[in-house]
Amino acid sequence: MIIVFDGDIFEEKVQGYDELITSIEERDIAAVSNPGFELFLLLHIDGSFEKYIKGHEAEFMTMIDGKYAYAYNILLEATGMNAKKNSNIGNLAENVMTAINQERLINQDIHRLKGKVSSNIGVIIEGILNEEPDI
């Protein structure tokens, strides 16, 4: 099972991140995007690393009104869609290879993500795509 969650909940609110990851990895796969899943969605847009992320890491990791909203706001600006309410955001999946390639430009080590713009979701998807089917 792949367990997907936002790393930002561990930035300020909850302790025990290392223990949670260790526990998940005993039997399952932990997929984490920090600060939130909107970061991974943003990576689906060609050139988004250069345009929105590179040099803006501090903004991604800064709370606005008690939330890590920068990724959400940038994704909304870039797509015109509210990722939490518009099901058309799923169309970004057509660009998953773009996301996988751009994710390589940020931290992918979920064991060292605190305070860092991070995601390992693309790594996991790439592994699934490259897996040979059982015959």
Image (tube, grey):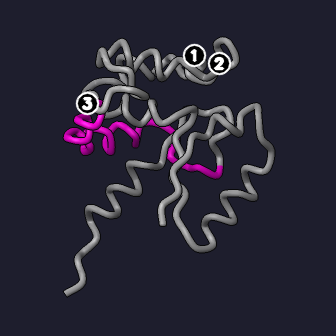
98 vs 110, left or right, is: left
Tell me the kind of residue under disc 1. Answer: Glu
The residue wearing badge 1 is 59
Residue 74 location (% of width, % of height): 42, 16
Marks 3 and 2 sit apart, C-alpha to C-alpha, by 28 Å
What span is in magenta?
89-111
Q: Amino acid at mark 2?
A: Thr
The image quarter in which residue 89 lies? top left
**Earlier residue among tags 3 and 2:** 2
Q: Residues within 10 Å of mark 1 (few under 14, many from 20)?
A: some
Q: Are marks 3 and 2 in contact (CB under 8 Å)?
A: no
| Real-space CA distance between mark 1 and mark 3, rounded to the nearest whole angstrom | 26 Å
Q: Is residue 58 above or below residue 84?
A: above
> Is residue 98 covered in magenta?
yes
Amino acid type, label 3? Asn
Residue 95 occupies which quadrant of the picture? top left
Pointer 2 and pointer 1: residues touching (CB < 8 Å)?
A: yes
Residue drawn at 28 percent across, 28 percent down: 45
The percent position of residue 127, horizontal first and vertical second, equals: 35, 62
> Residue beneath label 2, please?
62
Q: Secondary structure at mark 3?
A: helix
Which SS type dominates the magenta stretch? helix
Mark carried by residue 88: 3
